[in-house]
Amino acid sequence: MTTDELTEQVAAKRSFGKAVCQRMTENIVKLGFPVQTKLSLPDFDNAQFSVVIDPFTQSQDLVGYWYSASQQRVGQIKFHGDGSFYAEYDVVQPHPTKKRWFVEAINAWGQQDNIKTEAKLLDIPE
């Protein structure tokens, strides 16, 4: 796949991807994290994209990875050939209001017209 073809695929998914990132950000805020937080938030245009072949379906999937300033992977968004997607973005912070919980990540999945999100919580042992 050429760079131009990859650029076209990313452009074709931009509004969908931005909607996914917005829903994930809304979920983070809903948990009680302030919008102006030191926590980085998912931004479609900050992901680094490539196309991979799904080993099961053989479809071409557009995959983007987010990285921290130290180049550690902190999330991914994958658009499957069938129109579905899956995304995960690391939060890795204590829950802002429920001290027994640790927020590992925000997951998102579904289709363009049905974006679902969920926080991945871990219980902090006492």
Image: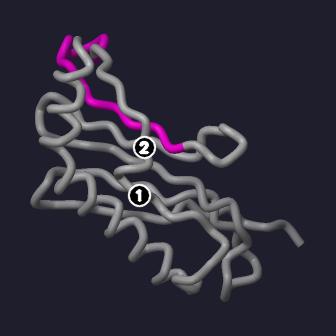
x 27%, y 59%: residue: 18
Secondary structure type for disc 1 = loop
x 50%, y 64%: residue: 41
Specify whether residue 94 is painted magenta.
no
Magenta range is: 54-66
Estimate the x, y position of residue 48 in percent, counting from the top left: 43, 36
Tell me the quarter of the picture where residue 79 sits: top left
Estimate the x, y position of residue 80 in percent, counting from the top left: 22, 32
2 and 1 marks in contact (CB < 8 Å): yes
- Residue topped by disc 2: 47
Q: Residues within 10 Å of mark 1 (few under 14, many from 20)?
A: some
Residue furthest out toward the right: 126
Q: Amino acid at mark 2?
A: Ala
- Residue topped by disc 1: 43
Left or right: 102 as drawn, with respect to 118 = right
Q: Amino acid at mark 1?
A: Asp
Give how far apart the Cα atoms at labels 2 and 1 are. 7 Å
Of residue 117 and residue 2, the one placed in the foreground of this image is 2
Of residue 58 and residue 25, the one placed in the foreground of this image is 25
Secondary structure type for disc 2 = loop
Could you say which disc has been placed on residue 66 in the image?
A: none
Estimate the x, y position of residue 35 in percent, counting from the top left: 52, 83
Screen quadrant of the C terminus = bottom right
x 32%, y 18%: residue: 52
x 68%, y 60%: residue: 92
51 w.r.t. 117: above or below = above
